Amino acid sequence: MNKTNFMSKKVYTLPIRPFLETRGGWDVSMSNDADPVFKFSWQNTPVVRPDGSKSWSLKPTDFNVFDIREALFSVKDAAQALAFFQAYGPWQINEHLGTDPTTITFSHLARQRDFYQDALLSREVWSIKKASTNEQMRTLLQDWYLWQPLPMEMTFHQPPTVIVRCKDIQDAMRASFFLDRLDGFPWRRCAREDCGKVFKLESKRAKLFCDTDCAHLQSVRSYNERKRAKASAGKSNSGPPQTGRTTRKESK
């Protein structure tokens, strides 16, 4: 039977809402090691209702995956990583709404941050390729992870919506990557050297900087650099100052 017979004859345009759904009440600790280790524990504490009664179930959190990605890309040191985990919970949980998270080091978090930035800039849609070296095999496994099907649910909310539930930060990062690469827009790294933020090119207009602030700052720096270069060139072309005594020849 033709495969198209199993497909709907209509084309539906529905909004997609990807979010992180995990339990609230996570406690995060950071070790004092050179490469800090972050550990997570779920605090099963009661919630006091307005009438004074207690509930032992915490309402699941609901975080936008693109907000999580922006927050991770902004993490530069261990203190910022701690604040990141305190806001969004564990990096990895074994099951949806589970309470058995894994630990993670700061160096591993930094590698994951850089991996997703590079993936947005350079990864193509996954295709099966023969892997003959360890590096090719590693790339193949990474591509398989990035491009495996994204679980979606169609709901009859108003308006009808497709939702993507992510169980932890790792899931949220993959969902944000998958959906952003699905729309076909390329990504670029900000040309300001001390910024380096990655951003999406959503128009055909050439864009080198992530925002107007970076563009303005780089313009000022370039102007000052040209000004200093011009001043330096003027000094070198003027030659050494003339010294010594001059004599006047008397006419007879």
Image: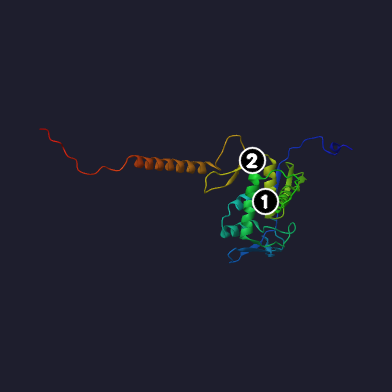
User: What residue type is disc 1 on?
Assistant: Met
The residue identified by callout 2 is: 186
User: What residue type is disc 2 on?
Assistant: Pro
Extreme residue toward the top, this view: 252
Q: Nearer the viewer, residue 231 or 251?
A: 251
Compared with residue 113, is residue 183 higher up or lower down, i.e. above or below? above
The residue identified by callout 1 is: 173
Q: Is residue 211 visible?
A: yes
Q: Is residue 28 visible?
A: no
The residue at the point 63 percent across, 50 percent down is 69
Q: Are marks 1 and 2 in contact (CB under 8 Å)?
A: no
Residue 28 sits in which quadrant?
bottom right
Compared with residue 231, is residue 96 higher up or lower down, i.e. above or below? below
Residue 82 sits in which quadrant?
bottom right
Q: Quadrant of the C terminus?
A: top left
Residue 129: % across, % down: 75, 46
Q: Quadrant of the N terminus?
A: top right
Q: Which mark is residue 54?
A: none
